[in-house]
Image: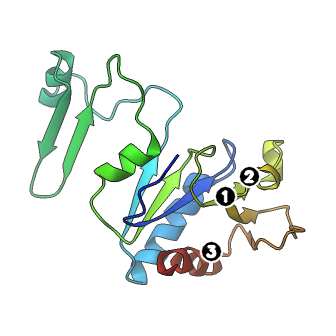
Amino acid sequence: MSIDRRQAVLGIAGWSGSGKTTLITRLIPVLVDRGIRVSTVKHAHHRFDIDTPGKDTWRHRQAGATEVLIASDRRIALMRELRDEAEPGLDELLARLAPVDLVLVEGYKTSMHSKIEVHRAATGKPPLYPDDPTVLAVVSDAVTGIPDGRPVFGLDAIDAIADFAAAQVRS
């Protein structure tokens, strides 16, 4: 897969329960404080709904609208019903985003973009990095060193992880 590199893309990948969302929500404010504009893409493995049943936009979608855009003076949201369409790939989703300095991607662990792996021993799952050359660094509570020299960060090393992420913006 070819990822559109209009902006830096850095994945936060790992097994369910490893702490990906926690890391992202701790990392974003540090990056923003450094003047880096950040957007995120989150992959969900299940059906989800961000709309409220009975509200106008929900009713529009239920009536058959393919896309529903809602806007106010504070935010906009675009919902698209895929119906019988295939799930869009990461590259297509990235192309829909407004330009920023860095897009953090949660999930999409098998896509071929650069990633930081979050690994916790408590998940009982093996690390991804031995078999995934796109993992540039590991954040973990258990891994103390990787033989091939990739950086390893502790779970609370947010400033160091932010330094690493910021370096990806500059490269």
Residue depicted at x 56% and y 57%:
11
Q: Secondary structure at mark 3?
A: helix
Q: Which residue is mark 1?
A: 134
- Of badges 2 and 3, the one in the foreground is 2
Residue depicted at x 14% and y 41%:
70
Residue most extreme to the left: 73
Question: Is 144 located above or below residue 72 in the figure?
Answer: below
Q: Residues within 10 Å of mark 1 (few under 14, many from 20)?
A: some
Question: Is 13 located above or below residue 150 in the figure?
Answer: above
Q: Which residue is mark 3?
A: 161
- Mark 1 residue type: Thr
Residue depicted at x 72% and y 64%:
139
- Mark 3 residue type: Ile
Residue depicted at x 55% and y 80%:
167
Contact (Cβ within 8 Å) of mark 2 with mark 1: yes
Question: Is 95 located above or below residue 65 in the figure?
Answer: below
x and y, in percent, of residue 18 in the image: 69, 50
x and y, in percent, of residue 2 in the image: 49, 51
Visual colour scheme: rainbow
Q: Secondary structure at mark 2?
A: loop
x and y, in percent, of residue 63 in the image: 15, 15
Q: Which residue is mark 2?
A: 132
* In this picture, residue 78 sits left or right of residue 10: left
